[in-house]
Image (cartoon, helix red, strand yellow):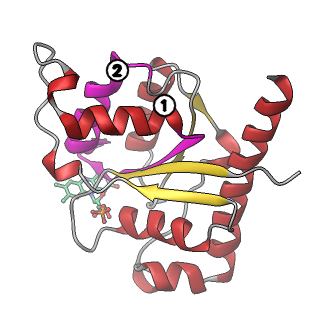
Amino acid sequence: MQTSLHLIAISGSLRAASCNTALLRAVQTIAPENIRVTLFEGLAQVPPFNPDIDIESVPLLAQLRDQIIAADGVLIASPEYAHGVSGVMKNLLDWLVNTPAFVYKPVATLNAAPRAHHAFDSLKETLTMMSAQWIAAASITVPVYGETKDTAALIAHPEINAQLRQALQAMQLTEQAQAVLG
Ligand SMILES: Cc1cc2nc3c(=O)[nH]c(=O)nc-3n(C[C@H](O)[C@H](O)[C@H](O)COP(=O)(O)O)c2cc1C
């Protein structure tokens, strides 16, 4: 059964040459026809989280919330800074905590740095607390450095390419299982 899937991809880095963004762009590029991956490009415009501000008054965030609700899943790749999730990524998640965006939403966290585990673990904890369905089989660790630092190199690397396809397949199997269970 070939179901179509729409995934929202969010990179937790604002760097132009970000390894995390490169990884998500690689997933986006190799995704088969029935899987659409939309990269969130507005992270730099997200204001500092303030619980006094209604998310409806921040159109960028209200729109992202609605996109995630409508999507079949989310892919997140975020750098580790000082053993934590990047501030901009955590800030975005804080805005979405009191919304249904991540509730029961299949989410994969992609780790672009094998030596970094604090941010990966912390991201998983936050997403689980937000009632997301963390998909272990899709949450891969990929060495994005040296020769594999950009999107084209990631796609050209046979093992990494296979890992990315497996991650997408795991998201698809999750969607299919949910469709069967209703
Ligand atoms: C201020 C700062 C702190 C960092 N802290 C860590 C760290 O605690 N652990 C780690 O593995 N890497 C750390 N790094 C390395 C980044 O995670 C790494 O450069 C990563 O590739 C950045 O992601 P990006 O390429 O998507 O921007 C740090 C980098 C910076 C600039």
Q: Is 161 above or below relative to 13? A: below
Type of amino acid under label 2: Val
Q: Is 80 above or below relative to 31? A: above
How many marks overall?
2
- Residue 82 numbered tag: none
Quarter assignment of residue 17? bottom left
Q: Are marks 2 and 1 in contact (CB under 8 Å)?
A: no
Relative to the observer, which residue lies in front, 67 or 148? 67
Relative to the observer, which residue lies in front, 16 or 61? 61
Q: CA distance from mark 2 to mark 1?
A: 13 Å
Q: Quadrant holding ligand 1? A: bottom left
Residue located 63% across and 67% down the image: 31
Q: Looking at the image, tell me whether mark 2 or mark 1 is earlier in sequence order.
A: 1
- Classify mark 2 as within 8 Å of ligand 1 or not, answering yes or no: no
Residue located 21% across and 24% down the image: 56
* Residue to which mark 1 is pinned: 69
Q: Quadrant of the C terminus?
A: top right
Q: Position of residue 87 (x, y in %)?
A: 20, 41
Quarter assignment of residue 34? bottom right
- The magenta segment is 71-100
Q: Secondary structure at mark 2?
A: helix
133 with respect to 120 (left or right): right
